[in-house]
Amino acid sequence: MLPLALLILLTNLLPLSSLAAISDSSSSYNSFLKCMQKQSQKNVSNVIYSQSNTSYTSVLRAYIRNARLNTSSTKKPLLIVTATSDSHVSATVICTKTLGMRLKTRSGGHDYAGLSYVCDVPFVILDMFRLRSIEVDAADQSAWVQAGATLGELYYSIWKSTNLLGFPDGICPTVGTGGHISGGGYGNMLRKHGLASDQVVDAKIVDAKGNILDRKSMGEDSFLGNPRRWGSEFWCRFVVQVAERCSNNRRRSFHANAPTTVVFYGKRSSITVKSTIVALYLGNAEELVSFFENDFPLLGLKKENCTELSWMGSVLWWNNVQNGTSPDVLLNRKPNSAVSGFRKSDYVQKPIPKSGLESLWMKMIGLVFNPYGGRMSEIPASDTPFPHRSGNLFKIQYSVSWSDSGAEAERDCVTKIRSLFSFMTPYVSENPRSAYLNYRDLDIGINHFGKNSYEEGKVYGVKYFSDNFDRLVKVKTAVDPENFFKNEQSIPILQRVLGKILA
């Protein structure tokens, strides 16, 4: 299902001969245009871009955030649909399915594996960037957020409505809310308020038949069990009453029971290892310092090491924006700003011994540790598709980026990350070795489209969803029995043979 919007709490395919016939972009465009006009009952020529359109390349590149996936050999979409209404989304689903093409959906383009804009078979991109309205109700402490809006635009809209509310979302302002929230969505306040997806109380989605549904009409199993909660809008509740001042610091500091988030960044150059610990505390500096004076006196944290800011000021601070800069900077989507990168993830459930850390420093390229606990441990793993709750100490993001466009630079960087990932095996979760859905990692398994295999899907599915995987398969089989919504790592469906359901 495709998400159209979220209400959030703030704190059957054609034969191969037909596929060959539509592989020509011009004929695809004409057929698709006629279908879209019929379905939406209006002129839609201004929202569909074929490869012959002079704006096609700029529209495609605008929200490709990984340059590694934008080369001359990368297969490009036959068409791009820049929907401006729910009816456009519905029509796109129907017409893509009718013409036997694959559908890819993109909100902000921050997809590490490029599954929102890369495919090996003829495909269409449904680009949500024009579906970006945000309606904040400060009195009700809620907002409707369309899937194409960015986190920066959401933060800005909250700030314009009230300075007493915030939202537990991510740091990067150019990330699209559609992919971020539907995959979990973590940020600085996860220990205090949980994930962004934990705040969603309703959503508009488009199913495989093109129906536009909300929570009531889709049913609770679909709402709570859909792994991506696809839709065009989300309704989120503002549960976060933010303090008038938030304290931020870049010191070696952390208190396990404090309402704070600490992010550890580690990066190795050719000579040295640099580590930085960055913390957000929802309160004033005096309170924060007192925690460390009692429990970690050797760290020597002082008030002058802390920066007190409003919640919006803190949002800007975490983006290294100079104090006093207007929040308008969050509205800059920074299109065409891709760099090449490769990412992987892990979860740690027991402390890494000193010997392991000492060896890690010698191998480290780029690591980010995000601590869990607090609210994350209180929410049962079965409450949402996101399972990584109690028992996890922190999540690791392995990251490497490069500017050289040559294949040798890519091979070198990817090899180093994979080597580091292998080294970490004894220190991370096992059976399964868990991974974070929003850090898509094709190394951990691919489901080949022709097979649509439950067994192939289970390889990566249990790593992303743990014990929730089989429940998600049942939901997917019920709501999308033809498996229209699929990608290299989508939830598979159960096969029906002679009336029996087979894995």
Image (cartoon, rainbow, N blue to C red):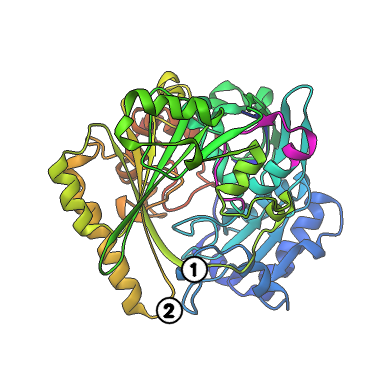
The residue labelled by disc 1 is: 339
Residue 111 included in the magenta stretch of the image? no
Q: How many marks?
A: 2
Give the x, y percent position of residue 286: 51, 27
Give the x, y percent position of residue 182: 55, 39
Characterize the local packing of mark 1: few (<14), some (14-19) or many (20 or more) Cα atoms within 10 angstroms.
some
Q: Is 259 on the left-hand or right-hand side of 254?
A: right
Give the residue type that dot 2 points to: Ser
Residue name at image x 49 percent, y 56 percent: 115
Give the residue type that dot 1 points to: Val
The residue labelled by disc 2 is: 405
Residue name at image x 16 percent, y 38 percent: 353
Q: Which residue is at the front of the view, 290 or 143?
A: 290
Q: Quadrant of the C terminus?
A: top left
Q: CA distance from mark 1 to mark 2?
A: 10 Å
Which of the numbered marks, if any, corresponds to residue 391? Answer: none
Write down the region rendered in magenta.
157-173
Q: Which residue is at the front of the view, 103 or 257?
A: 257
Q: Quadrant of the N terminus?
A: top right
Q: Which residue is at the front of the view, 217 or 467?
A: 467
